[in-house]
Structure formats: structure tokens, C-alpha cells
Image (cartoon, rainbow, N blue to C red):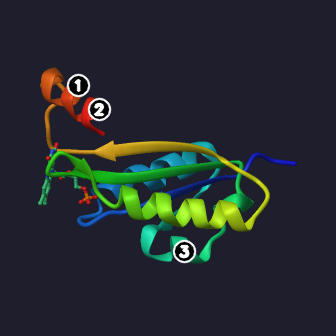
């Protein structure tokens, strides 16, 4: 059976969505808006990728996403692998800021 991947994205301006769609294309997966994620059982997938933005030093929507995921995993037998990606406006050269962000989150 083929490996099934879902990319759930939370995006205000379409930036994170662009990456989510790119991943979906590369991984032969499905990109779904976070608003609709509650209706899709993540346990139907082998891998669940959550993509969102950095918001004032934290991961936007992460707690809500985790709640949805936990609830649905409890209701189904299978636990998928979970991957997170986060977009942000901090330049890649700002390693100290990025390191702190990873540590804090
Ligand atoms: C209110 C607000 C707070 C933000 N805080 C951060 C931040 O702390 N660090 C950062 O690197 N980017 C920050 N950003 C930039 C966004 O994370 C970035 O533009 C992101 O790619 C937007 O993705 P989206 O439009 O797909 O939601 C912030 C943007 C907004 C509007």
C-alpha cells in the first residue's frame, strides 16, 4: 500500500500554504487547510505534516493542532509520524534568534 502523507497548513497570506503545496507535490501527498483539519482523521495517514507561521516567537496554532491530533488519534488505532515546519520573517542569518525559537518551542 502506498505511503499516505497529509500536509495541514495554517496560512494568513498564503506564504505557508505555498510551501505546503510544494511539499504535497514533492511527496505525492495532500495539502489541507487547518480550518478543515478537524474533519479529516490524521490516523488515515502514515505521515502528518503541520505547517504554520512564527507568531511573536511562538508556533501559531500548534496547541490547537496538537489537541485535534490527540483527539483523533485516541479515536483511531493508528498513530502517524508527525512532522512540523514553520515559516517566519527572521532571516536565516539570525542564527541566535532561530536557536532561541527552537529552544523555546
Ligand atoms: C503578528 C505577526 C507576528 C509575527 N511574528 C514573527 C516572529 O516572531 N518571528 C518571525 O520570524 N516571523 C514573524 N512573523 C512573520 C510571519 O511568521 C511570516 O510572514 C510567515 O511566513 C507568514 O505566513 P502566512 O502568511 O502563510 O501565515 C510575524 C507576522 C505577524 C503578522
Give the residue number, with chain letter if any, for mark 1.
Answer: 99
Q: Crowding near pointer 3: few (<14 within 10 Å), some, many (20+)?
A: some
User: Which is nearer the N-term, disc 2 or disc 3?
Assistant: 3
Could you say whether the residue bearing mark 3 is in a helix, strand or loop? Answer: helix
Alpha carbon separation for disc pair 1 and 2? 5 Å
Label 1 beta carbon within 8 A of ligand 1: no
Residue 17 in the image: above or below residue 41: above
Q: Which residue is mark 3?
A: 38
Disc on res. 65: none
* Few, some or many residues within 10 Å of mark 2 (<14, 14–19, 20+): few
Q: Position of residue 64 (x, y in %)?
A: 41, 65
Report, in whole angstroms, how far the alpha carbon at label 2 lies from the one at label 3. 27 Å
Disc 3 under 8 Å from ligand 1? The reply is no
Task: Provide the secondary structure element on which disc 2 rests.
Answer: helix
- Mark 2 vs 3: CB contact within 8 A: no
Quadrant showing the C terminus: top left
Q: Which residue lies at the image location 76% right of the left edge and 46% below the top edge?
A: 3
Residue 69 % position (x, y): 56, 60
In the displayed structure image, the side of residue 42 where residue 100 appears, left or right:
left
Please state if 80 lies on the left or on the right of 60 as rendered.
right
Marks 1 and 3, the one that precedes in the sequence: 3
Disc assigned to residue 102: 2
Q: With respect to residue 41, does 96 lie above or below?
A: above
Coordinates of residue 48 in the picture (x, y in percent): 59, 51
Amino acid at each position: 500500500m502506498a505511503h499516505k502523507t497529509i500536509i495541514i497548513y495554517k496560512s494568513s497570506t498564503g506564504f505557508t500554504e505555498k510551501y505546503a503545496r510544494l511539499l504535497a507535490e514533492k511527496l505525492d501527498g495532500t495539502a489541507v487547510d487547518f480550518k478543515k483539519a478537524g474533519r479529516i482523521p490524521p490516523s488515515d495517514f502514515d505521515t502528518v505534516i503541520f505547517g504554520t507561521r512564527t507568531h511573536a516567537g511562538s508556533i501559531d496554532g500548534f496547541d490547537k493542532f496538537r489537541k485535534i491530533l490527540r483527539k483523533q488519534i485516541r479515536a483511531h488505532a493508528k498513530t502517524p509520524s508527525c512532522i512540523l515546519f514553520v515559516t517566519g520573517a527572521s532571516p536565516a542569518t539570525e542564527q541566535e534568534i532561530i536557536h532561541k525559537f527552537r529552544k523555546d518551542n
